[in-house]
Amino acid sequence: MGAAGSSAELFSLLSRLLPEPLLLVTMGGKVVDSNVSSRELLGLQASALHGRQLTEFTEEAPERVSGFLKLCARSTEPLPGGLTLKSPSGSTVRRGCHGARLGLEVETQEPLVFVRFSTDVGGSAAFGLLGQKVDELTREVSRRREVEQALRASEARMRRIVDSNVVGVFFWKLTGEITHANDDFLQLMGYRREELESGRLDWRRLTPPEYSESDQAQVELLIHTGRHPPYEKEYLHADGHRVPVLVASATFLDNAQEGVAFTIDLTARKRAEEHLRLLVDASTALAASLHFAETLDRLMHVLVPRFADWCGVFVRDEEGLPKLLATHHIDSARTRLATAALAKNPPSLDARHGVGAVLRTGRSELLSPMTDELLESVARSREHLALLREGAPSAGIALPLLSGSQVMGSLLLVHLDSRRLYGPQDLLVAEEVARRASLALVNNRLFETAETERHRAEEASRLKDDFLSIVSHELRTPLTSMLGWLQLLRKGTLSPEKQQRALEVIERNTRHQAQLVGDLLDVSRILTGKMRLEVEAVQLSDVVSAAIDTVRTAAEAKGVRLLPRLDANVGPVRGDATRLQQVVWNLVHNAVKFTPTGGHVEVLLQHRDAQAVITVADTGEGIAPDFLPHLFERFRQADSSTTRRHGGLGLGLSLVKHLVEMHGGSVEARSAGQGKGATFIVRLPLLESVSAAPGATGTGDFPQELPLSDLAGKMSVLRVDDEADT
């Protein structure tokens, strides 16, 4: 309400209360309003009176009238005076009067003065009472105006708060209806203003069921105290997902059934808290194990489903191409499908985006949202693109796993829910997870390498101890037998038959000792690189036959049949006949040793793919699957105890492998398991397939020997031995 408006209303009120003539004039003297009595006193209509100067109707000088009005304009207390009024007919009448400012001191417009005329110059007591009444009315109007201004200011501030959209604000009823809300609240909940105005929004329906009890407690607090303190809860977004908020409400002073609520979106804070918990849990998982595979599995179970719906770890294979190492999905069935699809369609290092690009550049990449164009850029085929579209990824993050500056792998995180996208803050968190994972996985690799080396050292130490035990046993046993028979021979008490048996035993055990020592020397030569081969063109059928003949007596004594099938047309090989015979002898001897009475050993010589193939197959004890990979290692035996049934140092097959490889060939062992026999296959390149001519040193597999013919007549050889018994 303006100044003129409030003064005019007050004058109208006074006009209705007082019968005396009243004029409302400006401090400058212009008549603004009048009552009926004043117009009758002056004999004028309102239209002829209003807007004219008061001095037109008085005999006093204008300066005197103006001075009186100015004095009155500075006081709300009525000031006495007197004016001589003249009527249109020319008659004059002297009237006493009182004047005072009508309105408020704070008004900025020209003050208005009300003038009340009486019948005497000195005024009356009644007019004094009138002055008091006017003053009371003026103060009441002033108070009301201040209240109205305060209310308007408060309403403006509230409107400013609501419209500023700093926080979500909505006005509610206890019945649940939301009557008004600002844009921030509507955006937070995902609704349009048209939906609000149609009455569709209800704060009770926006609240998940588990919050009903706590909401009811807040409503009771509102009813009793008019407000409730801020508390955390969740509202249901229009698309169904939950929005964490901090909400506080208060009722209106004049209506406890309605009120206003202020809401603050806690999504960012909750996400930051979840990110912090994720990092803590990821660090715990990474520190829980020192084994690479177990660490990866623990990490992926932390990330899914909290931070991703699917995740996978990629590394480079032996050829440097990406391959999937591990994966985890919220749905185990889809995990298998994703694994199969990625195994069939691994990422390409030439891809502009995704895992391939990360493995190539070592830089993380935010793939949010995953558009169809992005899927096309990483797809390797139409079939692959169809699989990607079927998986319907909505967003992803591809991260490098680094070992220093080297990219050792990539971690891929994927959302499958279209409502969940990754943002820059998620990327920072994922990069921190990848950094911690990289450190942990590098440590795992180092630990596993150290563990492997430790196990190897322990195994080597154990094998050494076993070997020393076996060697001592293998040497002591025949020596004991030989010493016993020698003592009996020295006494001269043996019959001729016993003497013959003693000599046979001594000879057999001596040969056995020589064989053991020879094997040890051969291993030493191989380890020191001093093994020499007398290279020549060797007819394998003769070598194999000679080796079989050497073992035949032992086989017949044991009741094991030897079944040789040798192709005499197999071409010659380039090698050392003695060493090749040693190879065949070892294999056939082992076969006979481990084949029970009544069994058989089959020896084959065949020509296959420009190679000579020697096969030794038995019906013996067979080889356990877990021991098969260690079969050709030095000092390795399936039974290494001193109480084992079969003797030997465990060097024979190791020598076989080294000798065959020195001839440019290969050897392998096969067995269906214990009790199912064993098969050994030796492959040697035929002479016509060897690039070098017979007698040459070849490609370096054989050390060069100086032909003895070149030394004839040029040198003498003296052999010296310091053993007296030799």
Image: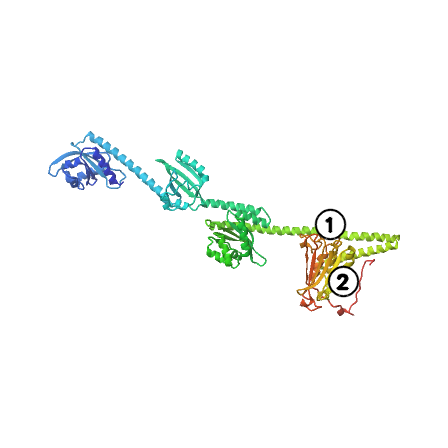
The picture places residue 104, in percent across and down from the top left corner, at 26, 38
Q: Amino acid at mark 1?
A: Ser
| Foreground residue among 471 and 239 | 239
The picture places residue 118, in percent across and down from the top left corner, at 17, 32
Marks 1 and 2 in Cβ contact (< 8 Å): no
- Residue 546: mark in rendering: 2
Identify which residue is drawn at 58% across, 59% down: 319
- Residue 210: mark in rendering: none
**Residue under circle 1?**
641
Mark pair 1, 2: CA separation? 33 Å
Q: Please give left or right for residue 709 compared with residue 115 in the image.
A: right
Disc 2 crowd rating (10 Å Cα; few below 14, some 14-19, many 20+) is some
- Element type at mark 1: loop
Of labels 1 and 2, the one closer to you? 2
| Foreground residue among 612 and 186 | 612
Identify which residue is drawn at 60% across, 51% down: 446
Disc 1 crowd rating (10 Å Cα; few below 14, some 14-19, many 20+) is few
Q: Which image quarter is the C terminus in? A: bottom right
Q: Amino acid at mark 2?
A: Ala
Q: In the rendered view, would you say 245 is above or below 492? A: above
Q: Please give left or right for residue 572 compared with residue 65 in the image.
A: right
**Does any portion of residue 192 appear in the rendered image?**
yes
| Foreground residue among 66 and 721 | 721
Residue that protrudes farthest toward the top in the picture: 125
The picture places residue 656, in percent across and down from the top left corner, at 71, 59
Residue that protrudes farthest toward the front in the picture: 598
Q: Please give left or right for residue 705 compared with residue 416 in the image.
A: right
